[in-house]
Amino acid sequence: MHTPRRAARIIESWFAAHQRGLPWRATYDPYHVWVSEIMAQQTRLDVVVPYFERFIARFPSISTLARADEDDVVAQWSGLGYYRRARMLRQGAIEVVNRFNAVLPADVDSLLTIPGIGRYTAGAIASIAFGKRAPIVDGNVARILARFHGYEDAWAHAEALVAACGSPRALNQGLMELGALVCTPRKPLCGECPLRPSCIAFGTDRIDELPAKKNAGPARDLRVTLYLIRDRSGRILMRRERGPLMNALFHLPHGDTSLLTGEPLTVRRPKAIGTFRHTITTRKIRFELFAAECRAIADYEWIDPRDLATIPHPSYVAKALRLAGNQIAAI
């Protein structure tokens, strides 16, 4: 079995040779690291990259993010999902400006006082941006350490590794990269893993058993009717809604309140366009899209589709518009 020092050096060397070229790794600017870590929560890094680049272009510093309107921030986040992350990131930026003179602190204890930063994110920022010996445990790291040691006590193992490592930045990123690229949840590439010679799960044929599967609960299958209603200039009818999911975003009129809130719009002469599927957390939604006219538009707004980039909206809206294509003439 490798000692923590030996295991840490192996991971650091592997990372040096196999790391992906990601934009926040160019300079390890603390603000960039912070944004990337929040975006990467529950989202694959290959998906994050274009959103990160657009977000940083729009809000190049903590100060500009703190001054930004919340709707503008959420609009730049549209498509990433889990929109509370965007709101908390902006609130955190406001706190950093007010309490830390717009400079992100380097120590874990101070980072933990910032809205939206928990134990993992604080450790990631401290170690990756500032080189501090702070452990991190996300899903990838927990999986590697459970398989490597043959039992689950991830934080204790992570603390031992970072205490013995040469570079906390390389170690923690190496753990995350190994989990994303090699030690994957299903069909891990054990033949490519530098830790395989001492991996307990590999040696005892328990790869599929570790870590223990958590019951996320059954997925809900939903059917939601959407209406694409246009005026003569091509604008589409939308409404900002309040609800348990995608709160305060602009939605298309719909005919199902199990997902969204508010009263469904009364429509006329609906014409079927097609269907598409969309997943939100444990909800698997089958959207049925119709072109329609309406009798009343109280609480709704006419939105130019070209302005959607500046308006907070869920990603299903873009899917609906792509499905519609050029089929719908202005009414």
Image: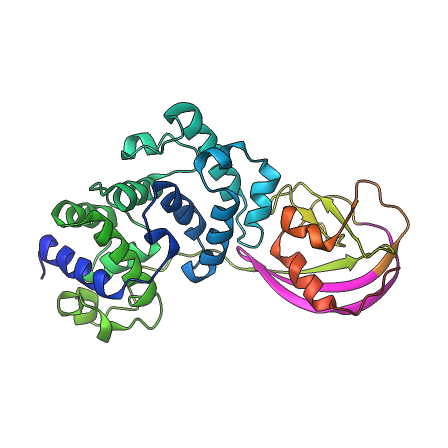
Instruction: Name the residue at the bottom extreme.
Output: 191
Is 283 placed left or right of 50 in the picture? Answer: right
- Quick one: quadrant of the C terminus? bottom right
Residue name at image x 35 percent, y 34 percent? 104
Mark yes or no: residue 258 visible.
Answer: no
> How many marks overall?
0
Visual colour scheme = rainbow
Foreground of the two, 32 or 115 = 32
Mark yes or no: residue 29 visible.
Answer: yes
Foreground of the two, 303 or 139 = 303
Foreground of the two, 294 or 129 = 129
x and y percentages locating residue 103 in the rendered image? 36, 31
Q: Magenta region: which residues?
A: 265-291
Taking 245 as reference, is 318 above or below it? below
x and y percentages locating residue 186 in the rendered image? 35, 69
Residue name at image x 19 percent, y 59 percent? 11
Instruction: Name the residue at the top extreme.
Output: 99
Residue name at image x 25 percent, y 44 percent? 127
Taking 264 as reference, is 140 above or below it? below
Answer with the quarter of the image where residue 190 lies.
bottom left
- Whether residue 254 appears in magenta in the rendering, the answer is no
Residue name at image x 25 percent, y 60 percent? 144
Main structural element of the magenta stretch: helix, strand or loop? Answer: strand
Is 266 placed left or right of 21 in the picture? Answer: right
x and y percentages locating residue 17 in the rendered image? 22, 65
- Whether residue 271 appears in magenta in the rendering, the answer is yes
- Quick one: quadrant of the N terminus? bottom left
x and y percentages locating residue 185 in the rendered image? 35, 65
